[in-house]
Image (cartoon, rainbow, N blue to C red):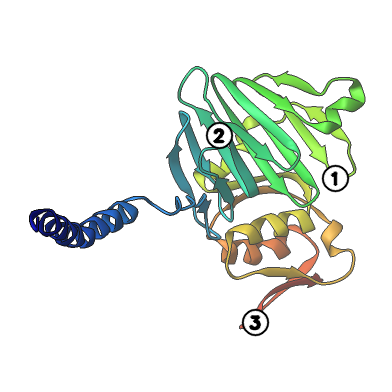
Amino acid sequence: PQTAPMQESDAGHSLMRRRPVLARFAAGLLAAIPISTPVQAARILQTAPGDLSNVTLPGQICCLLDTDTRLVCPPDSQYYRLERGQILFSAQGAAPARWLMVGNVRLHLQDRASAAVRLESGRIEVTAVTGRVWIQGPSLAASSRTARWLRPGERLRFYANGTCHRDHPDLDVILAWRDRRLIFQDRPLSDVVAEINRYETRKITIAVGTVGSLRLSGVYYVGQSGSFVRILPHLLPVHVTVSPHGTEIVPA
């Protein structure tokens, strides 16, 4: 008659012994299950003044970044985003999976195409270098076309006021920065200095007045700002002052 209570007691002790084991097993399972998946950060490619960078990106894309340029590559996205500067964007395959966003303009490369793309204050420029470039932008809607093909040598310039301009620039001039050169063709001195300052850590300033409207043509080699300011007074009616604080161009 005492056998049954003894069996129940043994079963109870056995269950009590198993409970810590079960608890540890359950805790192990909870530890093995991730509470949350960490968010993957965007890849940011950025060059300092005077630097160039050549990178290969997912989506069969090769990208050459000019000086002072910022390109954002969000994870698991069909778009790259140019936030500053200029790049040479090239497709290594027939149909890259990625688009490039530049402000409110986006473009897609076809047929192993390449495009020179530039973003600066108030203007976006897209120039087809090789192959075909499919481009979309709100400014194109004014001509009842929200998208169009660009063919080699054709450029579209989008302005902040909503207008768009098409032309066929000299590709040697557009791409000279790849060889560390800047080619100016009858450009205002203010534009020339602004472009040179992108590549140099020691900045050049222009005195207030009409000096900035003087026009200049020539070739500038990156890293040779000293030669530029020495020869400038022989080309234009200006005087250059150099001090520890920088270089200033003033009227002669």
Observer-nearest of 158 and 100: 100
As helix, strand or loop, the secondary structure at mark 1 comes to loop
| Real-space Cα separation, disc 1 to disc 3, in angstroms | 34 Å
Say which amino acid is labelled 3: His
- Measured along the vertical axis of the image, is residue 5 above or below residue 80? below
Circle nearer the N terminus (1, 3): 1
Q: Amino acid at mark 2?
A: Phe
Q: CA distance from mark 3 to mark 2?
A: 37 Å
Secondary structure found at label 2: strand
Numbered badge on residue 160: 1
Residue 72 got which mark? Answer: none
Q: Position of residue 141 (x, y in %)?
A: 87, 26
Work out whether residue 10 can be spotted.
Answer: yes
Q: Nearer the viewer, residue 165 or 138?
A: 138
Which element type, helix, strand or loop, lies under badge 3?
loop
Can you tell which mark lies on residue 89?
A: 2
How far from the left and from the top, in percent, is residue 96?
52, 24
